[in-house]
Amino acid sequence: VEGFNVFKSSKKALVESVENQKDEEEDKLSKEKKKLNQKLEADAILRKKFNIHVSGNNVASPLKSFAELSSVYGCESYLLRNFAELGFKEPTPIQRQAIPVLLSGRECFACAPTGSGKTLAFVSPMLMKLKHASSEGVRAVILCPTRELAAQTTRECKKLAKGNKFYIKLLTKKLIRSADLSKLPCDILISTPLRLSSAIKKRKLNLSRVEYLVLDESDKLFELGLLKQIDSVVKACSNPSIIRSLFSATLPDSVEELARTIMPDAVRVIIGRKNTASKSINQKLVFAGSEEGKLLALRQSFAEKLNPPVLIFVQSKERAKELYEELKFDNIRASVIHSDLSETQRENIVNDFRAGKTWVLIATDVIARGRSGRAGRSGEAITFYTEDDVPFLRNIANVMAGSGCEVPSWIMALRKLRWKKHRPKRESISTKPNEAED
Ligand SMILES: Nc1ncnc2c1ncn2[C@@H]1O[C@H](COP(=O)(O)OP(=O)(O)OP(=O)(O)O)[C@@H](O)[C@H]1O
């Protein structure tokens, strides 16, 4: 009987201890669930505050401050020191979300207005993950649509990496010709797709250890018809654990669909709306009777108020040259940049514009990308249009509306056209008699 009693009491004790264990587990589970819900709620509040929209599962929490890079992610002191030296007190919205996503090892489509700090958003996690310089070959690649932007991104990268001896290289024609790239110490390589794909073709580069691939201004990259070159770079970066990301001011559906074929699980991070101009721009539409009327209206607006720096985007390099010929004697310190100029000439023109030696820079849209004075940061954007341009106004209406600009309803009612396919043939801007007619 004692045995049974003992057995019974031990059985009872066993049952009780199993029940207690179950209660404890349930208690632990509900505490964890409560903690997770609190975290999700805090994330949602922070994202709402900074107009951050994410899609994808298990998205990392947005940064509350730069200090979290150290307290949560263990970043080295040189990085926060550089932020402080550069006067960066708080992360911008895109940095708050894209940095944790990339640090968590996820691929990312990041879309934020121009001037919103995307460069720091992709360079910081790269530096944190690479940790220090190594002689193991290229471990990160940044692709930019133009040589100017590649040069500018290289400068930014070096500023952020100061204090840590990373080998950060801009791929120039000279470097491809001169160095045996396979022996060149290089942790982070910055290039245009054309340059990098030609170096790959010449078997001068081994990208099999690349851990990070960033496509900056990806909307432009895909628009420039560089798909073949981009594809060769993506294929050469064969490291299975590579983390790829797209950064740009707009994320057209066509680009996202294409990118998803190689990055199916990428997290999408959008600041504001998908294709939004920066809120800090006042946008205006001005009707001009003809191409010459545009020139008159432009001169008129300069006569009323010339507030340098001024960027003028035109459709082609021919129009850029024509407009420059018209404005160069107008005492407005005009200059022009186009792809017929050498890299040095273009760099000098940009530096003069940034230094305020020239006030008005005429550029085609492709070349102008990468100008830190780009329309995305300017105070006012004026679009001059004629009857022939009316069908295309719908394409910019969304961006204007997104930046808070009043867009007439008749424009919103227009059908959207695919700009590239229908690029309008324009009359010459020039008011000079055509040599052929002389
Ligand atoms: N956290 C920050 N706080 C303040 N300024 C910042 C911060 N991050 C970057 N900047 C500054 O903001 C400016 C724009 O940064 P950046 O060029 O990276 O913008 P972007 O979004 O890449 O623009 P774009 O689309 O034109 O390339 C730069 O002068 C940069 O130094």
Image: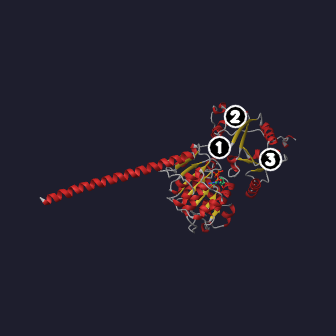
Q: Is residue 432 left or right of residue 400?
A: right
**Separation of residues labelled 2 and 3 (CA atoms):** 25 Å
Q: Tell me residue 429's x, y (percent).
A: 79, 41
Residue at 54% across, 47% down: 47
Q: Is residue 117 left or right of residue 388?
A: left
Please give the residue where the numbered disc 3 appears in the rendered image. Answer: 324
Mark 3 lies within 8 Å of ligand 1 (Cβ measured): no
Asked if residue 114 is positioned above or below residue 137 in the image, the reply reads above
Among the two numbered marks 1 and 2 on one chain, the one whose residue lies closer to the N terminus: 1
Which quadrant of the figure has residue 381? Answer: top right
Which residue sits furthest right?
A: 438
Q: Tell me residue 89's x, y (percent).
A: 62, 56
Inspect the image, locate mark 1, and give the three-letter code of the amino acid beneath it: Lys
Please count the marks in the image.
Answer: 3
Secondary structure beneath dot 1 equals loop
**Separation of residues labelled 1 and 2 (CA atoms):** 24 Å
The front one of 320 and 83 is: 83
Mark 1 lies within 8 Å of ligand 1 (Cβ measured): no
Q: Tell me residue 353's x, y (percent).
A: 76, 53
Instruction: Please give the label number shown on residue 279.
Output: 1
Residue at 40% across, 52% down: 32
**Separation of residues labelled 1 and 3 (CA atoms):** 30 Å
Instruction: Please give the label number shown on residue 122.
Output: none
Please give the residue where the numbered disc 2 appears in the rendered image. Answer: 390
Asked if residue 8 is positioned above or below residue 423 in the image, the reply reads below
Residue 92 visible? The answer is: yes
Q: Are marks 1 and 3 in contact (CB under 8 Å)?
A: no
